[in-house]
Amino acid sequence: MSYGELVRENSGHKKSGPKMKQAFSFPFDLSVRGDPIAMSRRSDMSKPPTPAPRDAPIVAKKEEAAVARAKILVSLVLFLSAVLVGLGIYMIGVEQDEQNFENLFAGYASEVSTVSRQKADQLFRSLDSFAFSISSQAESELRLSNQRWPFYSVPEWSQKAEKLIVDPSTSKDPQVILAPIVQETDRTEWANYIQQNTLSWVQESISNEGIDEQYTIDGVLNSTVPFIYELDAANGYQPTAISRSGESLPIWQTYPLKSDPSVPYSSVGLDSLSATEIADLYRVTKQVSGPTIGITNMTLESAGVTVPASHIMQPIYDTTHSGTAKQMTAVVLYRINWLTYFEDILAGGKGVVLVLRFSCPSDTPSIFSIKMNGSATAILDDSDLHDQAYNHLEYSETLFDPEIDESQVPDGVCVPQLTMHLYPTQEFYDSIEIFVSPLEKASILFAVFGLPALVFFLYDNLVGRRQRKFMHRIAMQEMIVSNVFPKAIRDRIYGRNAQSKTNLDVTAMDSFDSEREDDAPMAELFPSTTIVFADISGFTAWASAREPQQVFILLEAIYGAFDTIASQHGVFKVETVGDCYVAAAGLELGGAIAPADHASAACLFAHDAVNKMGEMTRRLEVTLGPDTADLDLRVGIHSGQVTAGVLRGERSRFQLFGDTMNTAARMESSGERNRIQLSQATVDLLTKADRSHWFISRGNKIFLKGKGNMQTYWLRRTAVQRSKSFDSSDEFSVALADETDYDREATGKQSSSSDLTALENVADGMNKMERLVEWNVEVLTSLLQQIIASRSGDVQSIEPLSDVEKRVGNHGATILEEFVPIIPLKRFNERELRKRRRAHTIDIGEEAKSQLRKYLTIIAGLYKDNPFHNFEHASHVTASVKKLLKRIVNVDEGNGLSSSSHSSHSFDLVDLAGHSYGITSDPLTQFAVAFSATIHDVDHPGVPNVQLVKENTRNAQIYKKSVAEQNSVDLAWEMLMQDEYHELRACIYQTEEELKRFRQLVVNTVLATDIVDKELQELRKKRWETAFSGVFLHEPEGVTMDRKATIVIEHLIQASDVAHTMQHWHIYIAWNEKFFCECYKAYKSGRSDVDPSINWYKGEIGFFDFYVIPLAKKLDDCGVFGVSSHEYLNYATANRDEWKREGEQLVTSFVRRFVEKEKGISRDMISKSLHG
């Protein structure tokens, strides 16, 4: 379909008498005929003047006298004002400058403090999660192997420790170290252990880190000292066996695995306690039972400068179970280079001094001064060098404080505290204007003269009031027209000619909208333009899984950013057609702009739009959910002539027509994601402009519908970026864009998207997993707000429930034995309804939200790296649950469902008549379902339950059936019940009844995701038939409603778990391939007897026919989910038909890609092993 076919509107015609006249209507009023002021002005002109009253001369004299008195008053005011202002200007200016200086520094200091604290909190959360995962894994593996600490090695150590490295330092020393606690009696046995087990983890580290040939396995083994040792300073720092009695803390696993050729021995086995600072850290860590930090030093080899560094010691315990006595068995040592830590924190500002103070005495300096110049940092000295004159502006913040009772600390043990202190410098002061500038003086003088002007304005107000209103209306109309039409068309609309382009011709505006037979269409030929089509690739599939509000949030944010970029580069936005953005260059000057210039402008616009697209989708993923960052832009550009003008009729607008539009559309549709395709015509213009380095041939010609074979080109974005950096003096660059400003925007130092929230801005520094965690945090937080709002916004202590919490889930029965067919839900309460309408204003508290974020971070880490059953899939399930909960409607239009949305995460659903069976009446129910979706596949092994039973794994021995599901509930619940999540649990429940209901909802919901067990499915089917058969049940009405609600919730999570089968075809295929790869991987690894590639095609058809489509029909039949049930059923049917046509070929491609990927991984591993 051509562009003209996409955007053409039907023209409207009106009959007037025997003839037909064209009626041209704008979506806004361009004439003055509707202006009552202008109309009154016309009528006044047609009337004879009204005679003045007899007392007019008297009135005139009085008015003249009043004017004279006003003039005298103004003269006195001017004189007194001049005297007063002359005396006060200097004092006001100095005071204002001083205040500006203090405010500016306070802003910079607050920025440094906030970001530094956030980084510190994130690091400690990551270390805690890392240590927890090691403890949990070690506890399980050591129990199975009948071993104990310290005889344990962390599997996949290199990959796990690599995730903790956030600020790579220039030191050769390891940044992450695992050091077990070895008792004196275990030293000999542990020395034997390291000789036997060093090879395995070193081989894994060499492969993962890609270490070169110089670092060989034999070299490591030969340099490993066969006993726990310390360095003898008196003997040239040679390793000697430790003679000290008591505990030792030898280095075991390290990351990164680096080696200094000048040192003939490995660090494995070196007793950390031989270093004074580590020994002090160890004493404090044992005392506080938590992470501690201590000062060390580090020398930069290239500069020979000592910089501040610290070791963080994170304890590892022998168990993760709450309520059980824990014993510290090992520690993780993490090294921070504070110089690199504070880099890139301060976006602006010059000459800020940061003083780091460590509270505990040390052999190394405990005070360091660092100078911050914007994003760069430099060490000043190992002492406090700030300017004492600015002590009153000190801004301090504690980066680390264990907050324990000092009275409990024994003598000789120092509990460390790390604080930072910020001070301005004279250099910072000099960078600000500290005296009253000429502009400020002029402003003051203007204010002085503005006072008499105000008096005269009052005198003239009645006369000028009507004129001002009229001119304001005209200005607003001109602003609207300026945004809709290019300059050439605007000039014709306003009747401007070449001699007077700035005078507004009201008569022309009036006649333009009038019905005249000789009023010709407003159209023009532009012989040389460049057209840009930019389509959001993947948008249709993405939108199929989103709510309508989320779709428009994305489009408004992206298109708004594109509008800004277009304005910067002199490109005119034509319109948007669906998810396609259409722009044109070469229209603004009526086609007079040089062709090479408009082609270059279009390419620069496309280049910046693609960059901005990636930046914004990463930010928006935090609020709009999974896969948002996977959206890309596909751009096509073509140059040529177009016919442009205003197509009159209803909803008139400016449009472009011609073959150039069709070709540009074809260039976009035949392009690739995240690339910009250029036609030969555009390339020719770039070549004439000496920009041939901007493009590269695509290769073979491509076939375009209606065009035949065409040679096309790719825009080289790196070349364009370099041109933007070095060609700033180019006349084109100066004329069309302020490249310097846009470069700052492209690098993130400046943002043009003012509508992005602070949460989205933080997302810039997150990886995909962190963005998914943050999105889940926001979803669950909005539901917690509903829960708290229903309790009048109060969160009470749940200490009285501590005994109940210990009993719930710890009664010796399995999760499956806790299942119940009916869960009593909370009934509708109108009073709570009024409270919940203000839920978006509820603050759950920083502590509770921090605990929720930490909990979800650990949950995400407990998900295994499976192709399908992973945290990303759990987030997709949560997104579907969220969508279905928001779509629950009342089938009775007379008693409708109240729905209000204050944000993209907000839930505010209330069932007024019970047609949702009470699901929407209880926010705790909604939270439990969303929570269950997030945790339902925790620790999933990537193989079905039947395989786990066959392998007789430890979990299979415990649970017998629904193994993975029961294990997920146990892991997630056990962690939630830990003391560190006390405030989070207080937000979820406040009474024993709420606790038990929450537990039961989680159990039922997660167990419902086991759809393979035939016995459970058959029971679920019978329960559905009982609830919705229409047969009267001799039971209370409330029990019947709870019966229906329970089974509907189970089907809701089932539909969400396979939501990809009921969404857009592309989403279905993507997740279907991931699930196939997971099954095929299990088969290839010997954990499955069935080759999935043999029956996958027929199996999917059967899955649709006997599970997915019947499930979608059930959602539709129960009448709870409104249009979503129709949407799911339609997608499921369409996907089934498409799979039947394309499935066999797709399965073949699945296998091919899997084999190619496995071969690539194998080649990489062999290559790394040979050259590593």
Image (cartoon, helix red, strand yellow):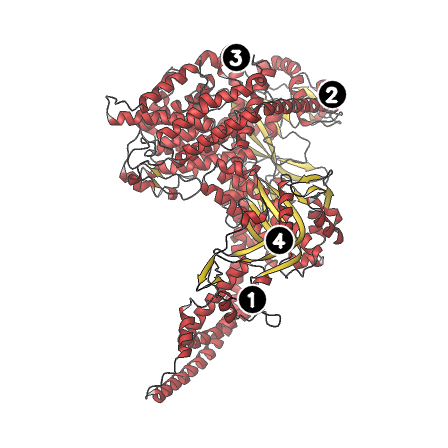
Percent from the top left, x then y, of residue 266? 69, 22
- For disc 4, the neighbor class at 10 Å (few under 14, some 14 to 19, many from 20) is many
Report the side of 1041 relative to 590 (left or right).
Answer: left
Which residue corresponds to the image point at 69% horizontal and 31% vertical from the top-left? 172
Q: Which is more toward the observer, 624 or 854?
A: 624
Q: Nearer the viewer, mark 2 or mark 4?
A: 4
In the rendered image, which residue does mark 2 sit on? 219
Q: Which is more toward the observer, 38 or 632?
A: 38
Q: Are marks 2 and 4 in contact (CB under 8 Å)?
A: no
- N-terminal-most mark, 3 or 2: 3
- For disc 3, the neighbor class at 10 Å (few under 14, some 14 to 19, many from 20) is few
Query: Can residue 871 be seen in this snapshot?
Result: no
Q: CA distance from mark 4 to mark 1?
A: 46 Å
In the rendered image, which residue does mark 4 sit on? 584
Q: CA distance from mark 3 to mark 1?
A: 77 Å
In the rendered image, which residue does mark 3 sit on? 144
Q: Which is more toward the observer, 803 or 685?
A: 685
- N-terminal-most mark, 3 or 1: 3
Percent from the top left, x then y, of residue 886? 40, 37
Residue type beneath disc 4: Ala
Q: Which mark is residue 436?
A: 1
Report the side of 685 relative to 102 (left or right).
Answer: right
Q: CA distance from mark 4 to mark 3?
A: 68 Å
Q: To which quarter of the image does residue 1069 belong?
A: top right
Query: Can residue 429 be seen in this snapshot?
Result: yes
> Which secondary structure, mark 2?
helix
Percent from the top left, x then y, of residue 883? 43, 35
